[in-house]
Amino acid sequence: MRLFHEAARVAFTDLRSSLSKLEEEPSLQNVRDLEAIFNDFMRSTAIHKNHEDKALYPALSASIHTRMAHKNYTPSLELLVNGLTEIPSFSEEHKEDHEAVARMQSLLQTLKTNVSSKEADADTVRASLGELTQEVTGWITFHEEHLQHEEKVMSPLMKGIASTLHMKVAIARTLLIVDRQGTISTQFPFVLSKLLRVKDWFCPMTKHKYSNLEILVVYINCFRMMMDNEKDYAVIVNIAKQIMSKEQWKEIQAYGLGTVK
Ligand SMILES: [Fe+2]
């Protein structure tokens, strides 16, 4: 879940560079390239927001209530109370996010129409490109802040979300209940391909620094635990093998990730 945020940070750079390429040369090909990156990113972001709204936030809120009922004020009473007031604001931000995505989609279509049209002059194309650039740039800033907002509130609270690994896995599995197909065939390859480009990552929760492929080990292992049988995990392995090089997959296998058990 948390690693989606890191993947999104890589995707922000792709979106930015695709946008500046388009500004340099507003060709139909460049519009199509931006559209592909944008759609890919938005599909996975939509799944992520769904995971949070329908699975993670309810689980985290429930765990805060349990902690308070048992007078277990981990990490602190103040942070628990703050969590309960902040969590609903994340879903509100998701709604705003949703509206921004719809505006970007429509501006992208307008630009595509203008670039393809023989009647539209260069000024019209420039004007629609300007509007799209402004909207996308604004969204990136908004979404970056949204991710930081969630991390600031949720990171200290996530540690106590479950008392056993078994319970943690059970919570993780609810993500698959929310959207199994989308999680496995759309979000998993998206996140994996982006994380391949992350060199080092410091996890604020475990205080551990992950280097090179270790971040992928963590991510793939989450799916390994979520999949309870060899057949389902084979789907994950096949996707990973398509994205990674033979050498990279060999390295991953050395961590025992080749099979479920
Ligand atoms: Fe979110």
Image: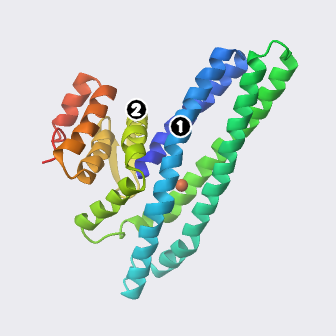
For the question of whether residue 75 can be seen, the reply is no
Secondary structure state at the residue bearing disc 1:
helix
179 relative position to 81: left or right: left
Q: Compared to 189, does 50 lie above or below?
A: below
Quadrant containing ligand 1 = bottom right
Q: Residue at x 74, y 16 (%)?
A: 116
Q: Position of residue 149 (x, y in %)?
A: 57, 58
Estimate the spatial distance between the alpha carbons at disc 1 and disc 2, rounded to whole Å.
12 Å
Q: Position of residue 156 (x, y in %)?
A: 43, 66
Number of other residues with Cα within 10 Å of mark 2, as a class: few under 14, some 14 to 19, many 20 or more: some
For the question of whether residue 154 can be seen, the reply is yes
Q: Residue at x 46, y 55 (%)?
A: 51
Secondary structure state at the residue bearing disc 2:
helix
**Residue at the spot of label 1:** 41
Amino acid type indicated by mark 1? Phe
Q: Residue at x 41, y 68 (%)?
A: 59
259 relative position to 88: left or right: left
Decide which of tag 1 and tag 2 comes sooner along the chain. 1
Please state which of the two labelled residues, at mark 1 or mark 2, is closer to the viewer: 1
**Residue at the spot of label 2:** 193
Q: Position of residue 77 (x, y in %)?
A: 47, 81
The tag on residue 237 is none
Q: Nearer the viewer, residue 166 or 211?
A: 166
